[in-house]
Image (cartoon, helix red, strand yellow):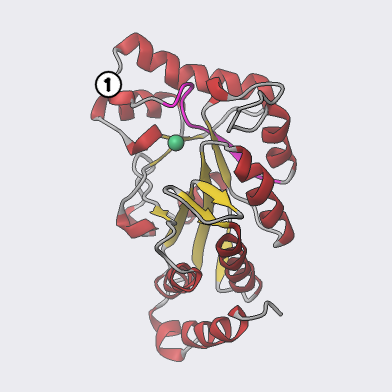
């Protein structure tokens, strides 16, 4: 059904459904797809591929860099394009206003970045954001305290290898696995199977997506297509549930 990944997927599913795992597994895996930066490429390729596979995720928007119309050199999407993610079932989270390192800011500037992005999103899409991703993954106790006054969930760049244990769920520090161009789609697919096996919550982080040779902080559209194929396949088989950060966190909280 999905070409060259098909064989791999079948073997992974057989592994994930083996009796020894079923005994140890308290429940199926949770997987969340996250996009940081609201780049034009995430709209052009990411949303298209997610829709093609029937998947949703969480888009983290640096609100001060988003316009109503595309500037000639703009690498970010427009507000209409952010609203297209919302219409497709995605969660819209905040990524600050101007994409700066929050720990470097004074209290007034920090408040502006954290609260300003909250009000920008609320005003532009009509839904208050619940999730925040810190630019560059840069955090301090002070920035986390401020963020958690306004938001329910904070996403780190790294942590737990991206597979968050549900029994130690920490809404201040939800770890992510950054998908980079030195990985293969099969490796990322294997992480999803591991999430199904141990019942953890795997949160994937994507930056740039390109149809040409990927540079730093970019992966190929073909790799994203294969990763999404795997996620959709495992979800259909009932081995994982793909959900936005907000919905996955709510499922975990409801089960506690
Ligand atoms: Zn960023």
Q: Quadrant of the C terminus?
A: bottom left
Whether residue 98 appears in magenta in the rendering, the answer is yes
Relative to the observer, which residue lies in front, 84 or 248?
84
* SS at mark 1 in the image: helix
Crowding around mark 1 (Cα neighbors within 10 Å: few <14, some 14 to 19, many 20+) is few
Ligand 1, image quadrant it occupies: top left
Badge 1 is on which residue? 104
Residue ID at (47%, 18%): 115
Q: Quadrant of the N terminus?
A: bottom right
In the rendered structure, the answer to whether residue 204 lies left or right of residue 4 reads: left
Q: Is residue 214 above or below residue 108?
A: below
Residue ID at (56%, 65%): 227
Q: How many marks?
A: 1
Q: Is residue 184 above or below residue 67?
A: below
Whether residue 236 appears in magenta in the rendering, the answer is no
Q: Position of residue 92 (x, y in %)?
A: 60, 36
Ligand 1 within 8 angstroms of badge 1 C-beta: no
* Residue 254 seen in the figure: no
Residue at the outermost top position: 108
Q: Position of residue 192 (x, y in %)?
A: 48, 68
Relative to the observer, which residue lies in front, 70 or 144?
70
Task: Indicate the quadrant where residue 143 lies.
Answer: top left
Relative to the observer, which residue lies in front, 168 or 219?
219
- Start-end of magenta stretch: 89-99
Residue ID at (70%, 34%): 81
Q: Which secondary structure is most common in the magenta stretch?
A: loop
Q: Position of residue 79 (x, y in %)?
A: 68, 27
* Residue 235 seen in the figure: yes
């Amino acid at each position: 059904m999905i070409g060259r990944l098909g064989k791999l997927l079948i073997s992974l599913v057989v592994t994930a459904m083996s009796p020894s795992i079923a005994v140890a597994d308290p429940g199926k895996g949770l997987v969340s797809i996250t996009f940081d930066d609201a780049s034009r490429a995430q709209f052009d390729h990411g949303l298209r591929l997610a829709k093609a596979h029937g998947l949703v995720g969480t888009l983290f928007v640096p609100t001060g860099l988003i316009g109503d119309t595309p500037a000639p050199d703009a690498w970010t999407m427009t507000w209409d394009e952010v609203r297209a993610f919302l219409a497709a079932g995605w969660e819209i989270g905040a990524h600050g206003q101007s994409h700066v390192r929050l720990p470097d800011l004074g209290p007034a500037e920090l408040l502006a970045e954290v609260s300003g992005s909250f009000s920008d999103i609320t005003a532009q899409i009509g839904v208050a954001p619940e999730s925040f991703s810190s630019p560059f993954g840069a955090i301090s106790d002070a920035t986390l305290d401020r963020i958690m006054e306004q938001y329910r969930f904070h996403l780190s760049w790294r942590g737990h290898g991206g597979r968050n244990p549900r029994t130690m769920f920490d809404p201040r520090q939800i770890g992510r696995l950054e998908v980079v161009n030195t990985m293969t789609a099969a490796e990322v697919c294997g992480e999803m199977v591991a999430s199904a096996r141990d019942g953890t919550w795997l949160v994937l982080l994507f930056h740039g997506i390109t149809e040409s040779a990927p540079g730093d902080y970019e992966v190929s559209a073909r790799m994203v297509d294969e990763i999404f194929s795997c996620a959709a396949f495992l979800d259909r088989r009932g081995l994982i549930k793909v959900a936005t950060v907000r919905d996955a966190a709510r499922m975990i909280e409801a089960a506690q």
